[in-house]
Amino acid sequence: MHAPPSSLPGPPGMIGIDTNVLLRTFIGDGDPHEPAAIAVFQGLSKTEPGFITQATLVEFYWMLRRGYRRSKAECLNIINRLAMSPVIEFDDGEGVIRALLLAEDGADFPDALIHTTFEQFQCAEAVTFDRKAAERLGWRLIGGDEAA
C-alpha cells in the first residue's frame, strides 16, 4: 500500500525533513542524493521553513556519531547550526537549545534532549540505569549493581 504523494494535512509551506536528507546535506560524501538534499535546504525560507522532529534529530546525531564516526563536538556544531537557522523549526526549539547546552557541559545529546522533554512536562524525577546520565543530568539511578 502506497501513500499518496501529498499525504500530510498541512497547508503549503513547512517542509518536514527526514534524517536521510539531513545526512545527505551535511556529510558531503558525494552520495548521488546529495544535490537533491542540498537543493531542499537552499529552497527553505521563513515562509517555507524546514521542520525537524526530536526523533529525527536523535537519529541524525546517532548516525553522525556511529555511522559516520563524527566527533561529539562536530555533531553538536551541526545541530547548533540547524538550531540557529532562521529557516529551520523544531517541535521544541527551546528544548533543542537547552539540550545543546547540557551536551556541551558533558551530557550525551540524546539524553539531554530527553531531559528537556522531562522538564517541559514537569516530571518530578527521571529514573535510569545509565550511571553517566544520572551523574550528568541529576536522574535517579536504579538497579543497584546492575546499572550500566
Image (tube, rainbow, N blue to C red):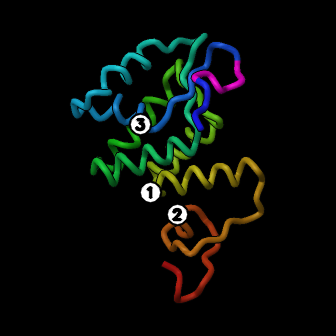
Q: Between residues 129 and 94, which one lies in front from this camera angle?
A: 129
The stretch of residues the image draws in magenta is 5-10
Label 1: which secondary element: loop
Q: Which residue is mark 2?
A: 136
Q: Is residue 112 above or below residue 44?
A: below
62 to the left or right of 6: left
Q: Residue at x 37, y 36 (%)?
A: 23
Q: Quadrant of residue 51?
A: top right
104 to the left or right of 53: left
Estimate the spatial distance between the alpha carbons at disc 1 and disc 3, rounded to whole Å. Answer: 27 Å
Label 2: which secondary element: helix
Mark 1 or 3: the one toward you: 3
> Is 116 inside the magenta-drawn segment?
no
- Assess disc 3: are there few (<14), some (14-19) or many (≥20) residues with their C-alpha within 10 Å of its C-alpha: some
Q: Which residue is mark 3?
A: 20
Q: Is residue 91 above or below residue 132?
A: above
Q: Residue at x 61, y 22 (%)?
A: 6
Q: Amino acid at mark 1?
A: Gly
Q: Residue at x 60, y 10 (%)?
A: 47
Q: Amino acid at mark 2?
A: Arg
Q: Amino acid at mark 3?
A: Asn
Q: Residue 16 in the image: x percent, y percent?
A: 56, 28
Q: Which residue is mark 1?
A: 106
Estimate the spatial distance between the alpha carbons at disc 1 and disc 2, rounded to whole Å. Answer: 7 Å
Q: Is residue 66 above or below residue 20?
A: below
Q: Residue 96 in the image: x percent, y percent?
A: 57, 40
- Assess disc 2: are there few (<14), some (14-19) or many (≥20) residues with their C-alpha within 10 Å of its C-alpha: some
Q: Counting residues from the N terminus, which is met first, the one under dot 1 or under dot 2?
A: 1
